[in-house]
Amino acid sequence: MENKKIDRIINKYQGKPNSLIQVLLEIQSENHWLPKEALDRVSKKLNVPLSQIMQIATFHNTFSLIPKGRHEVHVCTGSSCHVRGSTRLLDAVQELIGIRPGETDSDSKFSLDTSNCLGCCNLGPEIIVDGKHHGKVTPAKAEDVLKNYE
Amino acid sequence: MPRIDSAAELEELRKGILSKRDPNKPYIAICAGMGCHGLSNDRIITAFEEEVKKQDLKKKVDIRATGCHGFCEKGPIVVIYPEQICYVEVMPGDVPEIVSQTVLGKKVIDRLIYTDPNTGEKAAHQSEIPFYKNQMQHLINNNTKIDPKSIDDYLAIGGYSALSKALLEMSPEQVLEEIKKSNLRGRGGGGFPAGKKWETARNAPGEEKYVIVNSHEGELGAFMDRAIFMGNPHSVLEGLIIGAYAIGSHQGFIYTRHDTPQLKNNIDIALAKAEEYGLLGENILGSGFNFNVEVHFDIGIFVSGESSALMKSIEGKNPEPRAKYIRTSVRGIWEKPSNLNNVETWANVPLIINKGSEWYASIGTERSKGTKLISLSGNIVNTGVAEVPFGTTIREIIYDIGGGIPNGKKLKAVHFGGPMGGSIPESYLDTPLDFDELAELGAPIGAGSMLVLDEDTNMVDVIRFFLDFLSNESCGKCVPCREGIRQMLKIVTNISEGNGREGDIQLLEEISEVAAAASLCALGKTASDPLLSTLRYFRDEYEANIK
């Protein structure tokens, strides 16, 4: 991630140290992970020790310290999806792409994560790929959804 | 747009907006809530825009991408005004026909209207569909009438008149008194009286005070706050400014979800517009009252919805709760008095100021006033958001509004309040929706999610699921929560796999007692509530798996 982009995000918050979480969130959402160089720059610019940044970055699941795949797959494991069979769906997705939640495959094609309820319970059980919801996915239908991603 | 500096200017502006609007002009309200978004409603919105352009109807028809209509199950939903013809499960291919047949030709397209799966009866108008017919809507009903991105739409339905009344005709004490008399109770889960909380923050020592909208909505299966905040952001903002005035705060915070860009977008636009119109910032409506709002985001962690943790997060620190010997309304963000209320609580405030506490207190039960938004999910025919007065029975909500249980199955239990809530069995379905009555049954309302479970559900597995969730989400700061939940999960997992041992139930009860007494925050204190409620009503399911 370029320094220019990082600076633009930091400048938006006028260098306020309490904006640390917001700055990290924006870097994460733009870059999909938090590279060490980016964290160093945030530390310098916001005048927050790197140890404090690491405390935040490792506390939250949303932040990733390793690169993500081209497509981020989330299987909703909220309560409604759970009673509608998300455990079997998650098993099927793991089988299909060969990785477990929290992992990225060796081709950097997919990253897999579970997600807590996103409020689309009418769609359950669901898979969300790069923010797009695929509703009422049976284990058999999961392959149809995922084969469309390159 | 020049800023509004008095009540007269506000009314003039409103008149101006209304005079340009013809109530008979057809408009197409396309639901753009979360449920319909997941069903690719963007394609429907585009299709309508293209069709209207193609037929050169831009001057004759309005299109609104609105907030959630509530009936997520049958989305994408399209309502044609002024007739209120409601079409369900609309596909882009249906759009040209809707425009020419219904919008222009005033004819109902039979294929697209709702059919009751039980009776086969059809309903063309929204008000005839059982899901809507059996509700009492005072909050979510405005969602279909406004584009959340348009402040003019909100003004057209009377928006900000409560703010004008509060700031210009009432003293802060009078506003506080009105909220206290209304008996509004917090909708986030605790059910604590909002007026009392406001009063504590108001009377707390210190010049600088904060007000906060909790829009974290981490409760699994809860999506009503998103429906309101995304669909009608100004109503929440109006409530917040009124609250700030009553408490004596000049800085507000909105704490919301990072993973819902549509919500973030609508909030940002609402704040910018309110500021432009002089409804935020310096000297609001010429009253001399100043108030600003900052938006903060959660980072996908459940415990950050807890008030003291949330406040830590706003300070830029990890959301770890603290012991609340001193309430956050006395010592919150940066140790300053901080009054936090949930989205739905704030949305009720303009209503109370406009219609009066007496009117408000006439709805509901003796100790739970007003209406409540409920998110229906799980094994239910109509997943969605419904608004009912307190006092409505759980049976009415599930069968009359929710349409019952799918696939001809029987109902086994209803679980309230997500991972820290509780379940009631079928035999208690005639209990009215009420903070205290449900809490007594061991199933507190929580934020308002109702997870419906059919006869095939294994209750021990449901509890294992919730404990698993909580053990991942525990922040780890205090031992009773971190270790207690882990041990309870271990034992419940053993039982669910048929490997329970003699004494397991007693051990579970013992651990849950310690976690409840010694944990720092509600996550640990109430982590075992679902477990205890199922031990109360479904004990045989545990015992059957113990050797």
Image (cartoon, coloured by chain):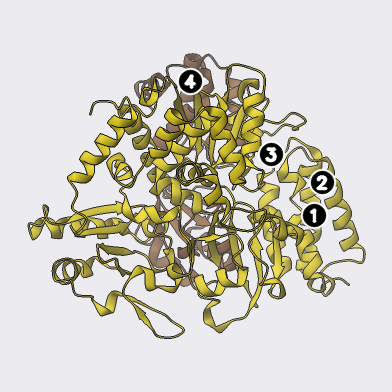
Chain colours: A brown, B yellow
Residue A11 found in image quarter = top left
Above-or-below relation of A131 to B384 = above
Q: Chain of mark 4?
A: A
Q: CA distance from mark 2 to mark 4?
A: 39 Å
For mark 3, what is the residue? B475
Labels 2 and 1 touching (C-beta < 8 A): yes
Q: Which residue is mark 1?
A: B488
Q: Secondary structure at mark 1?
A: helix
Label 3, secondary structure: give it.
loop
Report the residue marked by disc 4: A42
User: Which of A142/A18 is in front?
Assistant: A18
Q: Quadrant of the C terminus of chain B?
A: bottom right
Q: Residue at x 66, y 52 (%)?
A: B469
Give the percent coordinates (x, y) of residue A18. Answer: 53, 22
Amino acid tagged 4 = Val
Report how many numbered discs are placed on residues in the image. 4
Q: Element under label 2?
A: helix
